[in-house]
């Protein structure tokens, strides 16, 4: 048994895949503890995990609630700046108060969200071994490979210049956070901020399948593509009025749980639904304060939350903000998409949706009812989108990415040595009786 610490960003889009990975490791006999500020305690403990808070005196529960609500209304660079402001405060709490809490846990290995730069910095300072887990779009920069910009993979010099300028704007927005981390690292005798120092040299694991990433040539030897970390029984139960489904083709719409209070997007879905020969399920993702039109079409069902994995098993299409989890969950179910990216890595994810032929995209700023309806009709009307999504369903099913990720983490915890891409696990201890339990519980 290994004692493993989970350090992930406090948003549901990060907690969901980390929870599934944690359940898999617990099923293999390991001990898991999540570490974060008190605001994360309830949602982590409700999932059945051990949780240790730090910074409770200066950052008691509720400290970040209003900042999260404000963040939900933003998009683009303002959303990035607001997110980094929150992360700076949480980094301060980690650096000033977390070390005694973590030392008491006597961890064998840290499992660190690749965007939790503060946790990676503290792990290095404490000389603790850690693995980087990537649940959003991988951030490894490489010439000719677009990142968050939303540009397609191309040799077009104009597109490459747009991507370069987008990267510069994101770096400028993130400068205060990078400067804060760099100052801390220098004072601790660790050298300035550098991505190479923030991501693990033992193993870097992404839940992206390799086929859902632009061609790469220069990834670290310890970098591993896996597959989505998502299982129904690892999610908290979500009530849903299944008896209200009409039996018509089902379109599922959700704009996530973070930047999900952009009223015009919901208005576009409502108005586009009116002329569709299909039923539309619209999940608000907890954004109950969104004001919808008073007269809703009869084929529209609005819910505060939806059991997304179950809905996707019945859906013919998803209208999505193009968060990485939603995109991969669609592909695992063989469901094509209309992507409406709002902020963060979503433009980059939507570019990969378009590049793989698994959907089309509309920038959030341009999402108006007629254009959304046309995009829906295009995806439903052309068989190639459905066929491409189903090809990914096979790729993801055969790849067994969750087990692969857990194997890599177990190998690092057991040996303390890097796990290199392509390395065989034939002699690994692998899943034990937990494998049978997973098969019994799997949907």
Image (tube, rainbow, N blue to C red):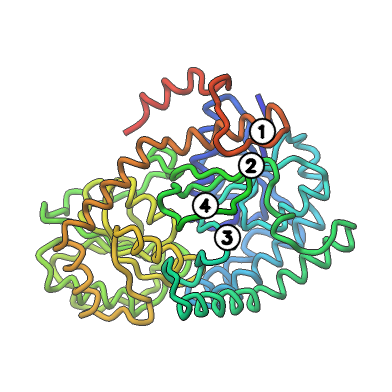
Label 1, on which residue?
412
Q: Secondary structure at mark 4?
A: loop
**Does the rendering let one see residue 307?**
no
Q: Are marks 1 and 4 in contact (CB under 8 Å)?
A: no
Q: Earlier in the sequence, mark 1 or mark 4?
A: 4
392 lies left or right of 126: left
Query: Could you give the CA–CA distance between mark 4 and mark 2, rounded to whole angstroms?
Result: 14 Å
Q: Earlier in the sequence, mark 1 or mark 2?
A: 2
Q: Secondary structure at mark 3?
A: loop
Few, some or many residues within 10 Å of mark 4 (<14, 14–19, 20+): many
Label 2, on which residue?
203
Few, some or many residues within 10 Å of mark 1 (<14, 14–19, 20+): many
Q: Secondary structure at mark 1?
A: helix
373 lies left or right of 262: left
Q: Earlier in the sequence, mark 3 or mark 2?
A: 3
Residue 315 on image: x %, y %: 22, 53
Few, some or many residues within 10 Å of mark 2 (<14, 14–19, 20+): many
Query: Could you give the CA–CA distance between mark 1 and mark 2, rounded to whole angstroms?
Result: 8 Å
On residue 139, which mark appears? 3
**Does the rendering let one see residue 336?**
yes
Label 4, on which residue?
135
Query: Could you give the CA–CA distance between mark 3 and mark 2, rounded to whole angstroms?
Result: 15 Å
Q: Are marks 1 and 2 in contact (CB under 8 Å)?
A: yes
Q: Earlier in the sequence, mark 4 or mark 2?
A: 4
Q: Secondary structure at mark 2?
A: loop
């Amino acid at each position: 048994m290994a004692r493993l610490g989970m350090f992930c960003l406090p948003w549901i889009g990060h907690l969901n895949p980390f929870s599934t990975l944690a359940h898999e490791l617990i099923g293999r006999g390991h001990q898991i503890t999540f570490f974060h500020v008190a605001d994360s305690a309830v949602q982590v403990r409700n999932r059945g995990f051990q949780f240790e808070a730090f910074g409770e005196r200066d950052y008691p529960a509720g400290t970040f609630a209003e900042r999260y609500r404000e963040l939900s209304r933003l998009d683009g660079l303002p959303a990035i700046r607001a997110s980094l402001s929150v992360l700076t405060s949480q980094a301060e709490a980690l650096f000033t108060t977390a070390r005694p809490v973590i030392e008491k846990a006597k961890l064998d290995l840290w499992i660190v969200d690749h965007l939790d730069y503060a946790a990676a910095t503290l792990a290095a300072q404490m000389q603790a071994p850690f693995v980087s887990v990537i649940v959003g779009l991988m951030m490894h920069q490489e010439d000719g490979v677009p990142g968050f910009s939303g540009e397609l993979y191309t040799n077009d010099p104009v597109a490459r210049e747009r991507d370069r300028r987008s990267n510069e704007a994101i770096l400028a927005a993130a400068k205060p956070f990078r400067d804060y981390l760099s100052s801390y690292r220098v004072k601790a005798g660790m050298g300035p901020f550098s991505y190479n120092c923030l991501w693990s040299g033992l193993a870097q694991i992404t839940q992206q399948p390799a086929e859902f990433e632009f061609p790469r040539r220069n990834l670290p030897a310890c970098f591993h593509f896996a597959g989505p970390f998502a299982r129904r029984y690892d999610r908290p139960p979500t009530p849903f009025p299944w008896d209200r489904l009409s039996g018509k083709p089902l379109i599922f719409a959700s704009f996530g749980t973070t930047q999900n209070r952009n009223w015009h997007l919901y208005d576009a879905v409502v108005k586009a639904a009116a002329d569709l020969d299909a039923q539309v399920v619209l999940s608000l993702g907890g954004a109950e304060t969104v004001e919808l039109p008073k007269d809703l079409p009869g084929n529209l069902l609005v819910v505060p939350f939806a059991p997304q994995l179950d809905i996707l098993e019945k859906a013919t299409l998803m209208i999505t903000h193009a968060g990485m989890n939603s995109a991969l969950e669609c592909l695992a179910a063989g469901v094509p998409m209309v992507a409406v990216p709002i902020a963060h890595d979503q433009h980059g994810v939507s570019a990969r949706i378009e590049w793989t032929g698994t959907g089309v995209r509309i920038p959030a700023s341009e999402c108006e009812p007629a254009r959304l309806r046309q995009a829906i009709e295009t995806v439903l009307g052309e068989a190639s989108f459905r066929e491409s999504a189903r090809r990914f369903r096979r790729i993801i099913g055969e790849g067994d990415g969750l087990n692969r990720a857990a194997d890599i983490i177990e190998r690092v915890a057991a040996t303390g040595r890097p796990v290199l891409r392509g390395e065989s696990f034939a002699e690994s201890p692998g899943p034990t009786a937990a494998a049978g339990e997973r098969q019994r519980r799997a949907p």
